[in-house]
Amino acid sequence: AVGIFSIILGVLLALPSFLGVTGDGGSEAAQTPSAGIAATVNGVAISEDEVTKYIADFRTQQDLDSDDSWGEWLVMYGYTPEALRSDTVNYFVNRELLKQAIAEEGIEVSDSDVDDYIAMITEQVGGESAFEEALEAEGYTLAEYREGVLFSLQQQALAEKVAPGEEVDDA
């Protein structure tokens, strides 16, 4: 049950490289830091601090606090620190572009939709206690999880609105 939760949580809050985010998505993304700004997306700044915190939080959540364990992880997944930073910036650029598209399309997801989804996951992992344990084990608060669920449901609604009935197969 906790495994299912971890998979779902991982999908919602995955590391940028596993999302397949590359390039600048048509944004004005900077590839190098400038005055504390990692990128600008249609006038919205993404700060260096936000990028650094995201990577630091990932390290903590994955128990990669030592330089040795971090270096091993980077090698295992074929990263340099610069490439990881670039992928993380691209993740934030992609996320901001999605937020802007959600707003432009007037996508709304109700609190009850988020509650229903969380109730379904809570049941799948074995109840409230197991759900809370899984959140704690993954290092997330309920508020952070709710935010991830909301964004995921908004993305689904956006996809349904702009590409209704479109199916993608493995080919």
Image: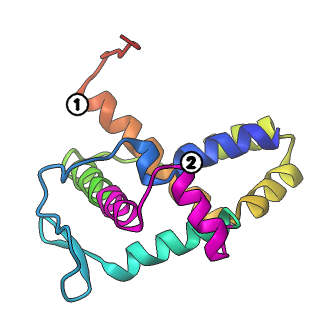
- What secondary structure predominates along the stretch shown in magenta? helix
Task: In the rendered view, tell whether residue 161 sits above or below residue 100.
Answer: above
Front residue of 5/89: it is: 89
Residue 116 shows in this picture: no
Residue at image mark 2: 114
Residue 94 position, x and y percent, is 28, 53
Residue 158 position, x and y percent, is 31, 38
Span shown in magenta: 64-92
Could you tell me which residue is drawn at 31 percent across and 32 percent down?
159
Residue 15 position, x and y percent, is 49, 54
Q: CA distance from mark 2 to mark 1?
A: 21 Å
Image quarter of residue 65: bottom right
| Residue 44 is one of the magenta-drawn residues | no
Task: In the rendered view, tell whether residue 125 sits above or below residue 58.
Answer: above
Task: In the rendered view, tell whether residue 102 sits above or below residue 165.
Answer: below
Image quarter of residue 92: bottom left
Image quarter of residue 80: bottom left
Quarter containing the C terminus: top left
Residue 103 position, x and y percent, is 24, 53
The disc placed on residue 162 is 1
Residue 35 shows in this picture: yes
Image-based side of 50 in relation to 135, left or right? left
SS at mark 2 in the image: helix
Tell me the amino acid under the disc marked 1.
Answer: Val
Could you classify mark 1 by the number of other residues whose Cα lies within 10 Å: few (under 14), some (14-19), or many (20 or more)? few
Could you classify mark 2 by the number of other residues whose Cα lies within 10 Å: few (under 14), some (14-19), or many (20 or more)? some
Image-based side of 157 in relation to 15, left or right? left
* Label whose residue precedes the other's in the sequence (2 or 1): 2
